[in-house]
Amino acid sequence: MSVTLKLCPFCGGTAEFVRKPKNVEELLIVHWPAKGVVCPARYEQYCESEEQGAAWWNQRYEEA
């Protein structure tokens, strides 16, 4: 299933899913603004699925 991640309303960047090399079972959704970009929305959250992570990220976008 594919998920849609909305762009950050502050810097126009997106979030992405990352698996830690030490524990590939842990899924993390992150928004790390590009170097030199000032963005108040740096975001890191462990999630159980891409769908859950997308729902959390997109909800934060709608609240901004």
Image (spheres, rainbow, N blue to C red):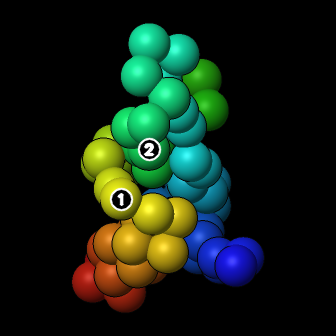
Name the element at disc 2. Answer: strand
Residue 1 is left or right of residue 38, and the answer is right
Inspect this view and state whether residue 33 appears.
Answer: no
The percent position of residue 37, horizontal first and vertical second, equals: 54, 35
Tag on residue 23? none
Residue 1 is left or right of residue 19, and the answer is right
- Residue at 55%, 37% in the rendered image: 18
Residue 42 is left or right of residue 2, and the answer is left
Name the element at disc 1. Answer: loop
- Residue at 72%, 76% in the rendered image: 2
Q: Is residue 52 above or below residue 36?
A: below
- Residue at 34%, 82% in the rendered image: 59
**Mark 1: amino acid:** Glu
Label 2 packing within 10 angstroms: few (<14), some (14-19), many (20+)? some
Inspect this view and state whether residue 63 appears.
Answer: yes
| The N terminus, quarter of image | bottom right
Label 1 packing within 10 angstroms: few (<14), some (14-19), many (20+)? few
Q: Which residue is mark 1?
A: 48
Q: Which residue is mark 2?
A: 27
Residue 49 is left or right of residue 44, and the answer is right
| Residue placed most toward the observer, 33 or 49 | 49
The percent position of residue 55, horizontal first and vertical second, equals: 40, 79
Instruction: Spot the residue most to the bottom.
Output: 62
- Pointers 1 and 2 in contact (CB under 8 A)? yes
Distance between the Cα atoms at labels 1 and 2?
Answer: 7 Å
**Mark 2: amino acid:** Leu
The percent position of residue 14, horizontal first and vertical second, equals: 61, 57
- Residue at 59%, 23% in the rendered image: 35
